[in-house]
Image (cartoon, rainbow, N blue to C red):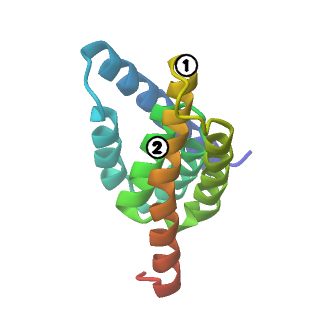
């Protein structure tokens, strides 16, 4: 394994560790989305050589079934117009659309209602994100 791959793996592990630690801090402090703000700041500070690793982490996070993880991935992909994550966003949208069709009955509550709420949130957040990324991909502002 070359040195850059080792360094890239260490950076990815650091991203995962920070995201989890900041998420745990938010839950403990009863704060919402502070982790997303911290991750956005970290993304801004990341040198261009490591942004590809960060972008891959975002693509993986947006495919997560954990609501906090996929939200962080989707929010940062949206904020920074990470067009390379478009296939992952499409995959996540398909997953949440399928889940929403499974949980379509509004009358049921409890855990069922929570699962439906997560699926609805996923669809409502990811549909416009797909359109935004597709538009940026076509225009290619780089």
The number of numbered badges drawn on the structure is 2
Which residue, given by chain and number where applicable, does mark 1 sit on? 111
Q: Disc 1 vs disc 2: Cβ atoms closer than 8 Å? A: no
**10 Å crowding of disc 1: few (<14), some (14-19), many (20+):** few
The Cα–Cα distance between marks 1 and 2, rounded to whole angstroms, is 15 Å
* Mark toward the viewer: 1 or 2: 1
Q: Which residue appears at 50% of the width and 43% of the height?
A: 120
Is 117 placed above or below 60 here?
above
x and y percent of residue 14 in the render? 48, 33
Q: Which residue appears at 47% of the width and 79% of the height?
A: 135
Which residue, given by chain and number where applicable, does mark 2 sit on? 121
Left or right, 34 with reference to 39: left
Residue extending farthest to the front is 107
Residue extending farthest to the top is 28
Could you tell which of marks 1 and 2 lies nearer the N-terminus? 1
**10 Å crowding of disc 2: few (<14), some (14-19), many (20+):** some
Q: In this view of the protein, which residue sits in the foreground, 30 or 76? A: 30
Quadrant where the N terminus is found in the figure: top right
Residue extending farthest to the bottom is 139
SS for callout 1: helix
Q: Which residue appears at 38% of the width and 61% of the height?
A: 80
Q: In this view of the protein, which residue sits in the foreground, 93 or 87? A: 93
Is 104 placed above or below 126 here?
above
Left or right, 122 with reference to 98: left
Is 27 placed above or below 93 here?
above
Q: Which residue appears at 43% of the width and 62% of the height?
A: 48
């Amino acid at each position: 394994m070359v040195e850059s791959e080792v360094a890239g793996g260490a950076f990815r592990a650091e991203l995962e560790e920070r995201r989890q630690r900041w998420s745990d801090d938010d839950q403990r402090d009863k704060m919402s989305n502070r982790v997303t703000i911290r991750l956005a700041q970290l993304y801004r500070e990341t040198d261009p050589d490591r942004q590809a690793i960060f972008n891959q982490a975002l693509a993986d996070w947006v495919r997560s079934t954990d609501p906090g993880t996929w939200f962080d991935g989707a929010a940062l992909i949206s904020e920074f117009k990470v067009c390379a994550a478009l296939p992952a966003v499409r995959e996540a949208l398909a997953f949440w659309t399928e889940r929403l069709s499974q949980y379509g009955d509004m009358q049921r509550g409890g855990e069922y209602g929570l699962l439906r709420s997560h699926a609805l949130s996923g669809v409502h957040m990811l549909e416009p994100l797909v359109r935004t990324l597709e538009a940026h991909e076509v225009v290619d502002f780089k």
